[in-house]
Amino acid sequence: MTAGSSNASPQAFAFRVLSRDGAARRGLVSTPRGEIRTPAFMPVGTAATVKAMFPQDVRATGADIVLGNVYHLMLRPGAERVAALGGLHDFMNWPHPILTDSGGFQVMSLAKLRKLDEQGVAFQSHIDGSRHLLTPERSMEIQRLLDSDIHMQLDECVRLPCTEQEAERAMRLSLRWAERSRKAFGDQTGKAIFGIVQGGETPALRVESARALAAMDFHGLAIGGLAVGEPQEVMLAMLETVMPHLPESKPRYLMGVGTPDDIVQSVARGVDMFDCVMPTRAGRHGLAYTRFGRVNLRNARHAGDPAPLDAESPCESARIYSRAYLHHLMKAGEILGMMLLTEINVAYYQQLMAGLRGAIEAGRLADFIGATKEGWARGEGARS
């Protein structure tokens, strides 16, 4: 079998909680393509690539799983083409687990001339203006063609703030689409489908959504429609509202989150899985995430600084390149600068998740979070 082969032994998708510290859980998701240690952060590989990183380097940071996206892949190169080329794992040379987002959020945020109804959402591509119809059934078909390990139901995600009436309409439509998505997914050995809790910032709607989805036999449940403009306290309040209504035996995924602080606060409330473009996007724009907080390498203060970002980081790139060199690369527009900072950021996020897992196992999560926040508070002028 070649290194990038997507062949996988048939076995059931499974999740088990290994240890707890308060509401926080350390667990293990088992798939035919490998295990996912939770809490887990999934680097975003929207269009079959984690931007500015080689797949083997993504793996070397400690990532067990990456995310791909139905909307982007259906438009380019096309799900049928990916299937003909052996599936998404072979196509991008990532033989490990992949979760695919259903495309609903991107349709709402990127597509032109959207028209949404009970059937699905008709839209024009932001790339070439071509017309498409994305239904729950078509989203499941695309994810099956891509051969991802975890599928997501098609849902409607509304931006916050919105009216309670708008949140209720979108939540109920998403529940009907959840039923259709679950039926279209069927019974695929070794694969999983997650439902998505919606309901805006209205507790009663969130609870209704969570309870209805919990009864639909999904393999995991996600919390969607957060980190879309609301304050952190609203996000955390919605998590605290929803968590008691999600099955203990299934993984919980907070979609599109987020900053390191969002992550540690959400882990403490029982979330198992995360994804966000933040570490890769920040890296391409000169921002580094470190145990000392964010460092803006475009800032002139770094121009003559021979110190590395973090001399004690497990990530070699954070140890061996000076801040002055990274500053130079970004000011010069050199691609290497974007690559190095993206690697450093993804590695930091994975180090944070490993630290959270270890702290939960040791029963010292509060101490770990306190020490982590103290490090961030030192600011970008800190030195190891």
Image (cartoon, helix red, strand yellow):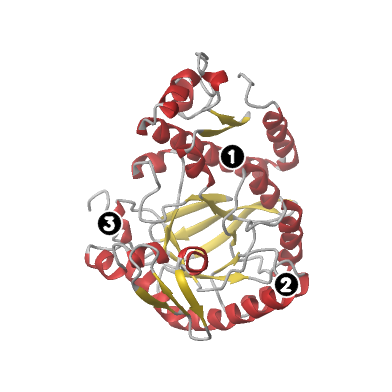
**Rendering quarter of residue 148:** bottom left
Q: Which mark is residue 91?
A: 3
Residue in the image at 68% along x and 52% along y: 266
Left of 280 or right of it: where is 33?
A: left
Q: Residues within 10 Å of mark 1 (few under 14, many from 20)?
A: many
User: Vertically, is 57 above or below 227?
Assistant: above
Q: Amino acid at mark 3?
A: Phe
- SS at circle 1: helix
Disc on res. 163: 2
Residue 186 visible to the viewer: no
Residue 254 is situated, as x and y percent measured from the top left of the image, at: 61, 59
Which-is-in-front pick, marks 2 and 3?
A: 2
The tag earlier along the polypeptide, 2 or 3, is 3
Q: Gap in Å between the C-alphas at discs 3 and 1?
A: 29 Å
Q: Disc number at residue 352?
A: 1
Q: Amino acid at mark 1?
A: Leu
